[in-house]
Amino acid sequence: MHDIMLFGEGWDGEVRQVEQGAIRHQYIPHPQDPHLRAIEFIIKEYISDDGEMYLVGYVDREPLMQDVAEAIMRYRPTPV
């Protein structure tokens, strides 16, 4: 399992776990909350300024590099 930072649909880099080699990640919210729906994130690799590789999942648009860098500092995901 690898850490992945999620962006879009209200996510701002929060870390979840994804299996190695995955190209998509589906988040299914708690079924008792009717306002939430399943979300599918596209997974890409991100290389930080210090050369570490991280996984980023996004919906619709890729996050800005600055947003990813801030999420790394805030949530401290483990590099791949």
Image: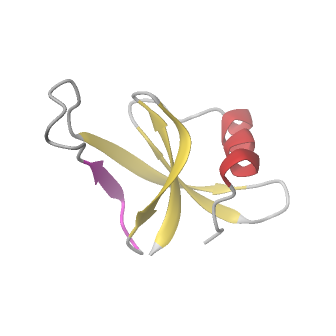
Q: Quadrant of residue 60?
A: top left
Quarter of the picture holding the N terminus: bottom left
In percent of width and height, residue 44 lies at: 50, 53
- The magenta-colored residue range is 21-27
State the residue at coordinates (65%, 32%). 64
Q: In which quarter of the image is residue 38?
A: top left
On whether residue 16 falls in the magenta region, the answer is no
Question: How many numbered markers are drawn?
Answer: 0
Q: Is residue 38 above or below residue 18?
A: above
15 with respect to 26 (left or right): right
Q: Is residue 48 above or below residue 68?
A: below
State the residue at coordinates (70%, 50%). 72
State the residue at coordinates (38%, 47%). 42
Out of 20 and 32, give the one closest to the viewer. Answer: 32
In percent of width and height, residue 27 lies at: 29, 48
22 with respect to 8 (left or right): left
Residue at the outermost top position: 35
In percent of width and height, residue 14 lies at: 53, 46
